[in-house]
Structure formats: C-alpha cells, structure tokens
Image (cartoon, rainbow, N blue to C red):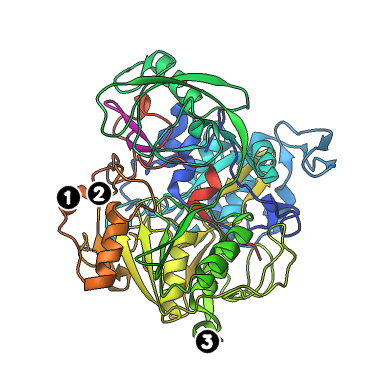
Amino acid sequence: MRPPGETAGFLMSEKKLMKHPARVAPMLFSHALCSVVALSALLAGCGGGDDDGNRAPTPASTVMFPGDNTLANNLLGQCAVPRTGINPATSRPYPDRAGSLLTEQRWLAAWTNDTYLWYDEVNYGNPGALPATTLAYFNTLKTPRLTPAGKAKDRFHFTYPTALWESALAGEDVGYGATWLFPSSAPPRKVVVAYTNANTPATAPTAALLRGTEILRIDNIDLVNDATAASVAILNAALFPSKAGETHQFVVRDPGATATRTVTLTAAALPAAPVQSVRTLASGTVGYLQFNEHIGPAEPALINAVNQLRTAQVSDLVIDVRYNGGGLLSIASQLAYMVAGPTRTAGKTFERLTFNNQYPSINPVTRTANQPTPFYTTTLGASSLPPGTALPTLNLGRVFVITGADTCSASEAIINGLRGAGVEVIQIGEATCGKPYGFYPTENCGTTYFSIQFKGDNALGFSDYTDGFVPQNGKTTGIAAGAVVPGCAVADDLAHGLGDPAEARLAAALQYRSTGTCPAVALASVRGEQVLSADGRERDPALALQVPDGHVWKKPFLMNRIQDR
C-alpha cells in the first residue's frame, strides 16, 4: 500500500496487547490489503512484477550487512527526513534521527535478510544503483518465485503510512457502511454492494442499499466506462472517503431492477461490525453466523453469537467467511475452540509458526523461543471483556464454512486449525486466497512495512495451501491433496441476502447437510469474478479502481492474519 489516499483498518481496542503494534505484533494479511493503493503504484505495490522467477538472487553480502539483526538495529530510525516532536499515537518522541536514503534502504535490506521468510530468494541489488525511493526498493525485496498454480509466491508485500496505521487502532472506520464487491475494476467496470452494516448511511431510508445493488455513476462520472485517469481519481475518492462528512452522489441499480435511482451518501466514522446475521435455520437445528473481521471487537460478538446458538441447541453450524480476509490469529483460535470444544482440542496446537531457516527455534522478531499458538479457551483482553473469562463452546465435530476468493489468512487458519484437531470441515463456495503466511508490521521513518516472516502449520503439520483450500468438486488441478476439502463449489449469489436460506451458497450447505450431495453448478462461473492475470496484476492498472484483486474491498488488515502473542 502506498500514499496517498490510504486509510487504516486495523480496528481494535487492543492497546493492552499491542502497545507498539508496528514493532511487536505479528500479522497474517492478504493481497487485498493493497486495496487503497495509489494508481501509479498499483502494479509495483501489489502485482507480481515482470520476473519469471528463475533469476539467481543477489547475495546479501552485496548490500554490506551481516547475517543477523545487528546492522538492522543500528540503522533503524536513521531517516532521510526525520520526524520531530511527539507522536500523538504513543505520546512519546519520534525515534527518528538524521540519516539518508541509503541508510533507510540498507535498513530494509538488513531487516529483510534477517527476518523475511524467503530471504535467500531475494535480489538485494547493488548499493550504488538502488531505486530512487525506499518504497521502490522495498517492492524489490521479495521472492520472484511462483506457486505451483503459477501465482506470485509472495502476493502479500506492502507498506502503510505509520500515522494512518496507528490512527486505525482507535476502532472506527470512515465510510458509508457498505462493503464493495468488484467483479471488474477495469473498464468495463462493475462494482456492486457485497453487504451493508445496519444503522449506517448505506442502510438509511434515503439510500437503502441492498446486497447486489450495482453502482453505475458517481459524482456524474461513468463508473463503468470512463477511461480517463482524472475520472478514476474522482471515483476512487468517492468509493473510499478519507474523512467523515464527505458527501457523494451515486446512481445505482437495485438487484433485479431495470430502472436506476440516485442516492446521496455522506461518509461517517463507523464502529466495527465483525459479526452479523446470527440465526438458526432448518427448524432451529442449524446455526448460521456471518463473520467479517478478525478484530478485537469480534471477541465479545463471537461469544454472544455462540451463546445464542448454544441456547438454541444447534447441532450444526455454518460460518460465513466469504468476505473475511483475516486479522487476529487469536480470534481465529478462539472461534475454532468455541466450535470444537475442550475435548477435541485438548493438548493440540492451533497453529505453529515457522520462520526462515536461520531461526529453527527462535522467533527472529521477538528474540524469544518460538511457541505454538494454542486453542485459546478464555478471553485475552483484546476487547472490552476482561482477560481470563472462559469461552462458551458448541462441541461440534463438524462445521460448514462458506468461502470465497477473499477468505484469507486468519479465516483460512480456522479451516486448517479445525482440520488439524480432527473436526470435519465442509467447504462451500470457491477456493480461498491461499495465505498460510504472516508478518510483524515494522515501522521505520514514518512507514510501516509488512513483509512475510512466517508460515503457520496446524497440529498435523499441514500448511500447503498456497493456492487456497478448494471444495472437492471445484478446480483442484495442481492443488495439494491436503488442501482439497469436502464440500461444494458454488458461485456467489448476489440476488439474495447473506443468511437467507435461499442464497446459493447457504442453500448448498443445507443441501449437503441433508443429502451429502452438491447442487449442479457450472464450475467456470465459480471463478468468474477474477480480473487478474496469472502473476497477480490488473489487466489495465492505469484505469483500474483501487482494488487490485478484483474482489471485495476492505480496510487493510482485514485481508490478513495477525499473530498477537
């Protein structure tokens, strides 16, 4: 991610756990973090680049640093433009001191060589001929190699302005309360409403946006066809408002309608709504919950949801994470425990982190012994709830998980962690994003860097889902056997609300539960919303909106996984 126009989305009241999040909190994020990137940086920041993956890495010695963190620590805070005064987020002086472009770039190289998971696959370059900015250099400090399916191996490399990143910790988001889905972000574009949050501008009577409502024009700009950079800038600014009070005019077409209507949306600072549509189905025996964000406020929301479903004595559960790109790994662990219960998870690891081969037993960021993430059985202080309170459980041996291409990282960890504990997971939807990786956000000179530093294995030692978890009747060619999951490939259904038993993916889950069979589906349509080439780049980035993966747009951390130990 690059400035300008980025807005933070790490929405949690976790000051207790994350006093200095940019320096100590490990995270598990996805590609869609690059959602609010400046158009000029879209290709460099989020795409795969032109490399074919076969060139030999330039050795670390070329950039003059040792194979430990000594130089990285010495160079940290040596800035070309040092910040001065007090950081309002920490109430402490900025740590910056006088440096140069080269000291910032040498720090990036040293830090990458020390902590990056694939540090030995990186081309570090020649210190006499490095790119003209630290961001441009950072974009080169990743592996050029590909996954077995031909995707960029590292699709999760990005930055964020530290001031905006820190401001996101307040727990509010500026927007309309609508989450956009991008079947195509380049002309001819298509943008629709994925879902809305209650009591927001998007659901006010004057707007009444529905799931599946299509956006046609914004501020008198043709969203579908306009092919000028100036117009794209206007569209981006309206879709992703930067401050409360901004007002923009939208021409929309409701699902199933032929006529259009015009609505005015005013951006507001909105609280998080990570859990929605908690209900019982099929005569009360099946529980359903829509889980959108692994953030601190999800802890009490998930507890309330599980208590509600437990009181209803559900015998099966459907967790809808089709638009959940990740977040706190601890939240994923807590939810998995609440599903499976104490007996199935006793003595088992939810996820074990593996760092680069320089650190077989030590966490290179915290410099402590590498300890596995357990199935957390109590609250952890990540929300308004006090730590140490026992979590409720449903004690289920089977769970249905509705997935999409935006199901990423911490959401995938739920699938992987439960399967590692012997819980049967039934996957309904499409292949997940494929991110068993994470990182510790690290701040230097006003920029927070996110570079893959670990992968996560379940209790069975499995993490080979770099091309996603895939339902067994989906497109499984080239997919590792352990990543093929029982269930049904089903295209997203924008004609019905989430949680509606008639919605195609939920209907398929209910059918599979009753009969063990999947509905007939044209598999070609299941991946029909992607607009990326094989290397992860937009077909026409110069005229694309700010969503490089062509799917759902969310605030940054939401497409990742955050390990918050």
Residue 545 position by quadrant: top left
Residue 441 tag number: none
Which residue extends farthest top? 220
> Which region of the structure is painted magenta?
181-192
Q: Are there few (<14), some (14-19), or many (20+) residues within 10 Å of tag 2?
A: some
Please provide percent x and percent y for residue 293. 53, 52
* Camera-side residue of 552 and 147: 552
Residue 113 sits above or below residue 222 on the image: below
Q: Which badge, 3 or 1, comes first in the chain's sequence?
A: 3
Quadrant of the snapshot with the C terminus: bottom right
Please provide percent x and percent y for residue 398. 39, 76
For discs 3 and 2, the disc positioned in front in the rendered view: 3
Q: Secondary structure at mark 1?
A: helix
Residue 322 sits above or below residue 338 on the image: above
- Residue receiving disc 3: 343
The reply to whether dot 2 and dot 1 touch (C-beta < 8 Å) is yes
Q: Are there few (<14), some (14-19), or many (20+) residues within 10 Å of tag 1?
A: few
The span from disc 3 to disc 1 (Cα, nearest Å) is 41 Å
* Camera-side residue of 18 and 518: 518
Q: Secondary structure at mark 3?
A: helix
Residue 339, magenta (yes or no):
no
* Amino acid, disc 1: Ala
- Residue receiving disc 1: 524
Residue 92 sits above or below residue 283 on the image: above
Which residue is pictured at 30% across the width and 61% down the height? 428
For discs 3 and 1, the disc positioned in front in the rendered view: 3
Please provide percent x and percent y for residue 257. 27, 29
Q: Is residue 84 left or right of residue 507?
A: right
Q: Secondary structure at mark 2?
A: loop
Residue 448 in sight from this viewpoint:
yes
Q: Is residue 88 left or right of residue 369?
A: right
Q: Are there few (<14), some (14-19), or many (20+) residues within 10 Å of tag 3?
A: few
